[in-house]
Image (tube, rainbow, N blue to C red):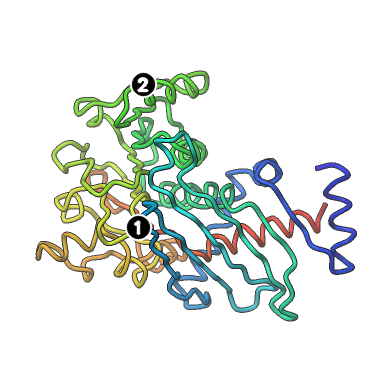
Amino acid sequence: MGLWIDFVIAHNKNHFMITLSKKQIIGMVSMKEAIHAMESAFVHLSSGNARVPTRLKLDIPDKNATSLIMPAYAVGEPHYCVKIASVNYSNPHKGLPLIHSVVKVFDASKGNHVATFDGESITAIRTAAASGLATDLMAKKDAVTCAIFGTGVQAASHIKSITEVRNIKKLIVFSRNENTARKFCDSHSKIIKCEIGSQENLKEAEIICTTTPSQFPLIEFDNIKSGCHLNVIGSHQPIMREVSSDIIIHSKIIVDQIKACKKEAGDLIIPMEEGRWSFEKIHGELGQIVTGEIPARESETEVTLFKSVGNAIQDLAMVNLILKKLNHD
């Protein structure tokens, strides 16, 4: 990490502030480390040890955007954090990132601001790491084919997380724009075999990741393979959805947090409002699988689905991981 990091650490002891850029965070944290950090994050969440209020949302309708403020603390931890994110839904069409964000870190005992971290890299890593953890716990061990919906930062990060936990040999890429899908395939073809997605080859996928801000189902139950695992992470508002009601009805559903999904997970809220499904049918939370409180996959044929709307406790897990690495170095 070089002299710059050493300089920051030395001055932080005298109450100077740590600032880390996207490049520095990506260089510091491996996906394997992030997936491991998510285990404790979700255990904190499911055990009630986490303090994560409902995120504050500011709609910016004339700019087709939303701003989110997400604080988190876990009892016994030395720090708490607050992430501020801007989600501009028109940005991908302009060649800009969908999300801009920053994470502010505070000393839990003294209350002083101790660090500012790039939020986009933390969000990209921790979101994909949660899916990697869910995949490791729920997908079939011999899964070798993964379908990805979306071609943005989250899609790329999910490829890293899924290939960390499974020996993926083939990637099937879906995008509304075929040229974008082709470029995404080209950028990953040196490390994995890639194909442009279709209804036919989707049925080959043993793992499916959806990473889009869609308001309409991208996948129907009849088009997925028996025994596949889905990570559905793109939608985070009641009107947004990436999978059909039939998929929700016929899948074993694991969520990041039930309370948050009842308010924000359109993939679940819409079939409930249709009268076709209820939240009582959720199998449980990811943290409960980590601890062994509930089982994960119970047969080779069942379809498992991890629904995540994102939780600030994941940001805190990343913050703690980064600060520990800095202090150790």
Residue indicated by mark 1 = 61
Point out the frontmost of discs 2 and 1.
Answer: 1
Task: Please name whichever residue, 281 or 118, is drawn nearer the observer in this view of the structure.
Answer: 118
Task: Please name whichever residue, 230 or 126, is drawn nearer the observer in this view of the structure.
Answer: 126
Task: Name the N-terminal-most of marks 2 and 1.
Answer: 1
Residue 74 image-quadrant placement = bottom right
Within 10 Å of disc 2 (Cα), the crowding (few <14, some 14-19, many 20+) is: few
Q: Is residue 108 above or below residue 168?
A: below
Which residue is depicted at the point 50% across and 22% down?
A: 187
Please provide percent x and percent y for residue 309: 38, 59
Please provide percent x and percent y for residue 34: 58, 51
Task: Please name whichever residue, 66 or 179, is drawn nearer the observer in this view of the structure.
Answer: 66
Q: Is residue 196 above or below residue 17?
A: above
Which residue is depicted at the point 69% across and 77% down?
A: 108
The image's mark for residue 135 is none
The image's mark for residue 179 is 2
From where the camera sits, is residue 296 visible?
no
Within 10 Å of disc 1 (Cα), the crowding (few <14, some 14-19, many 20+) is: few
Looking at the picture, which amino acid does disc 2 mark? Asn
Badge 1 element: helix
Looking at the picture, which amino acid does disc 1 mark? Pro
Q: Is residue 149 above or below residue 74?
A: above
Badge 2 element: helix
Per the model, the C-alpha gap separating discs 2 and 1 is 29 Å
Q: Residue furthest left?
A: 275
Please provide percent x and percent y for residue 188: 49, 24
Q: Is residue 51 above or below residue 16?
A: below
Residue 46 image-quadrant placement = bottom left
Which residue is depicted at the point 80% across and 58% down?
A: 327
